[in-house]
Image: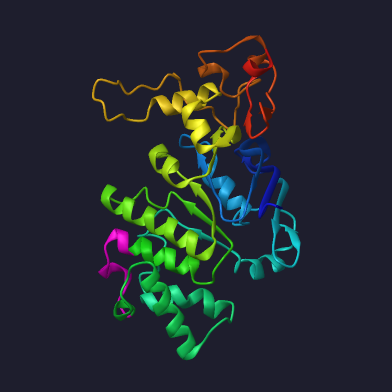
Amino acid sequence: MKPLLQVRDLCKHFPVLGKGLLRRQVGTVRAVDRVSFDLHRGRTLGLVGESGSGKTTCARTILRALEPTSGQALFHTADATVDLATIPESRVKPLRQSMQMIFQDPFASLNPRMTVDAIVGEPLVIHRLARGSELVDRVDEMLMKVGLQPEHRQRYPHAFSGGQRQRIGIARALIMRPSLVIADEAVSALDVSVQAQVINMLVDLQDEFNLTYIFVAHDLSVVRHICDRVAVMYAGRIVELADTDVLFNDPQHPYTRALLSAVPHLDPDVPIRFDAGGEVADPGNLPRGCSFHPRCPDCIDPCDAEVPDLLPLGNGERLAACHLHGQ
């Protein structure tokens, strides 16, 4: 079956400008560099990594919130296949009906001067999909789907808790029944008990509407619960891509092993540790060869000279970018 989304060598580079009157470009920040993956309809892909690894930039570039530098993002709709990375901006707006984003901060992503019904119904108004009583009915229906009461639709965002505000943001993203939803740290700003409620709600809505998620997160326990496949990013690149259970039970890249070693255990005698010393690689000044090699405990000769490709391991369902697998 053809994937809903095929990303191929997607890049997002930001110029670094020097000081002075002319402001010439003196460098490049490779925030996203040659990212590739497939995402099938009804599935969930997790993007994980430390802060600054490029997860959010990659997600925003796929949705054309940021203009890609190069590469492809092939989005397969019911009628045609479009390359989100190269189509004109005028053709992107109609596609917004099929792809939406849930933002991290429910306090900043909602307009404080708009009521709940105006916020949730705004996408339908912009795309001229509903008006009048039909608009009210669809807003009420979606509010109930996310666990809010329709009689609260005339309230403003400040009257709600953080978890309720995030539910409003989710309702706004889903009211047009999109095919692809990108959740950018959608539960990281919420209390733990509220996180569980929102995550379970997202899973139920996925089953009901046949949604496809890209779930950007740094909480690996949440990723393990909600995602079918996981892509581990470091310094703008995917270093490992595998099914969730396979990756958590048998990580192959040293960076993946280091991330998993930092996950807290229920057993208090198991120490919390992070094997990789040093700082995250600077995407504006990447080291030669593998970006992770200055922190890698398993570094070998090619690591500081050659950039490893993301290659399949075993049956091809798992991919890793590491010179160790070529030895």
Which of these two is toward me, 245 or 290? 245
Query: In which image quadrant can residue 229 be found?
Result: top right
Outermost top residue = 301
Q: Position of residue 223 (x, y in %)?
A: 44, 42
| Residue 37 x, y percent position in the rendering | 65, 42
User: Does the rendering let one see residue 46?
Assistant: yes
| Residue 162 in magenta stretch | yes
Q: Position of residue 48 (x, y in %)?
A: 49, 38
Quadrant of the rendering where the C terminus is positioned: top right
Q: Is residue 136 above or below residue 78?
A: below
Residue at 57 percent of width and 49 percent of height = 59
Magenta residues span: 154-164
Tell me where residue 130 sits by quadrant. Answer: bottom right
Q: Is residue 74 left or right of residue 248?
A: right
Left or right: residue 275 compared with residue 30: left
Report the residue at 55% width, 40% height from top: 54
Q: From the viewer's perspective, is residue 131 above or below residue 61?
A: below
> Is 133 displayed left or right of 29 in the figure?
left
Q: Is residue 312 magenta?
A: no
- When asked about the image quadrant of residue 81, the answer is bottom right
Query: Which residue is pictured at 36% across the width and 77% down the height?
Result: 115
